[in-house]
Amino acid sequence: MKNKHYSLNPRALVTGGAGFLGSHLCERLIKEEFDVICLDNFFTGQKRNIAHLIGSPYFDLIRHDVTFPYYAEIDQIYNFACPASPPHYQYDPVQTTKTSVHGAINMLGLAKRTRARILQASTSEVYGDPSVHPQVESYWGNVNSIGIRSCYDEGKRCAETLFFDYYRQNRVEIKVVRIFNTYGPRMHPNDGRVVSNFIMQALRGDDITIYGDGRQTRSFCYVDDLIDAIFLMMHSHAAFTGPVNIGNPGEFSMLELAEKILSLTGGSSKIVFHPLPQDDPRQRRPDIALAESELNWTPRVTLDEGLRETIAYFRRLSQ
Ligand code: NAD
Ligand code: UDP
Ligand code: UDP
């Protein structure tokens, strides 16, 4: 792809670029010969995620909060800024909503001015506690607007609304991706999500904490598969805006996940049960037919393979 600004490489802006997914995306874009601006306020992101990219002539790191305007000349925007784990996004819920809503407005304003294509990291949380299973893109969801998850769920839903209104009103080229639970190396070890929690607990010999009875389900996508899909989506034909589900349709209960992680780590932790948090979805699995047909994408990494890589990463961190 040629850029509009007469430098050698096309320019991509990754908001939330120092986070788990954003850092993998920055790395991929540099490999694809993009000039990358990584923008992050380091709320949940970590310098170690992108330390190996600092020094590359194709990488700029900027400390900035997306709730404030940002000006640059760019060709593509990947809007990933937003805390993603429930304890993190519930820590300062007002800031979480601001990040999704004001952040989307600023990045869409930037896309409108520069005519950049813009991709939104939306989420399966827009389906809430779904009554349609597996979830298809045409399902409108079942979301509580006043609960403890609402700052995240409704913030992301409002961001989707803004994307489609900028598309209709200002002809901004948008791409909306609904990401289902994704895991892998560079997840924050203390971010409170289930995969990182169970692995860290198993490696330390601490109790494995299951919330509720452990029969609720999730579908887990390995990070490399997700990044492939994000890249394909950004470069898909302009008329394909999404929203498109990206995730791995394998569905596991939290009890199954705990047992898998115990067997892969060789840990002997005890499983204990804690109360289920409010509004915790009972089931979740993506229907990925649209991604398969429009992007010619399907996830390749099995849960066992992906967990092995992730466990190896957390082992190295703990040494
Ligand atoms: P993460 O917490 O590791 O990354 C989020 C990044 O955004 C961090 O680096 C954080 O410092 C940064 N950030 C937060 N608020 C910001 C602000 N106001 N200004 C600038 N930077 C800010 O989480 P992640 O798992 O990498 O998630 C990245 C994106 O993908 C999020 O938008 C999340 O909602 C979305 N997503 C992730 C998953 C998943 O399973 N990992 C699932 C669905 C959606
Ligand atoms: N914006 C930005 N960078 C730009 C252009 C706009 O951060 O390069 C912000 C700007 O501050 C504004 C928001 O994006 O608040 C929305 O821009 P838009 O042009 O849609 O609206 P307006 O400027 O008319 O409020
Ligand atoms: N969960 C759990 N133990 C933990 C952390 C999470 O049983 O230590 C459960 C949580 O209640 C939810 C599922 O695992 O049902 C996935 O939680 P996560 O926070 O990873 O993602 P989300 O709920 O946002 O899908």
Image: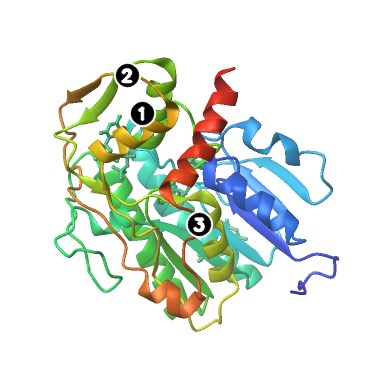
Which one is nearer the viewer's eye here, 223 or 126?
Answer: 223
Give the residue displayed 32% in from the left and 62% down from the top: 286
Query: Which mark is first along the chain, 2 or 1?
Result: 1
Residue 233: give x, y in percent of width and height: 53, 70
Amino acid type for the residue under numbered disc 2: Ser
View quadrant of ligand 2? bottom right
Can I make out residue 57 in this image?
yes
Q: Which quadrant would the C terminus be assigned to in this image?
A: top right
Q: CA distance from mark 3 to mark 1?
A: 25 Å
Amino acid type for the residue under numbered disc 1: Leu
Residue 311: give x, y in percent of width and height: 50, 32
Q: CA distance from mark 2 to mark 3?
A: 30 Å
Asked if the residues shown at circle 1 and circle 2 are in contact, with their CB atoms under 8 angstroms apart, the answer is: yes
Could you say which disc has been placed on residue 269 in the image?
A: 2
In the picture, measured across the screen, residue 8 lies left or right of residue 224, that is: right
Q: Which residue is mark 3?
A: 226
Q: Nearer the viewer, mark 2 or mark 3?
A: 2
Residue 99: give x, y in percent of width and height: 44, 46
Residue 149: give x, y in percent of width and height: 25, 43
Label 3 crowd bin: few (<14), some (14–19), many (20+), radius 10 Å:
many
Give the residue displayed 32% in from the left and 46% down from the top: 152
Query: Which mark is first along the chain, 3 or 2?
Result: 3
Q: Is residue 224 above or below residue 6?
A: above
Establish whether ligand 1 lies closer than 8 Å to the Cβ of label 3: yes
Snapshot quadrant of residue 238: bottom right
Q: Which residue is mark 1?
A: 262
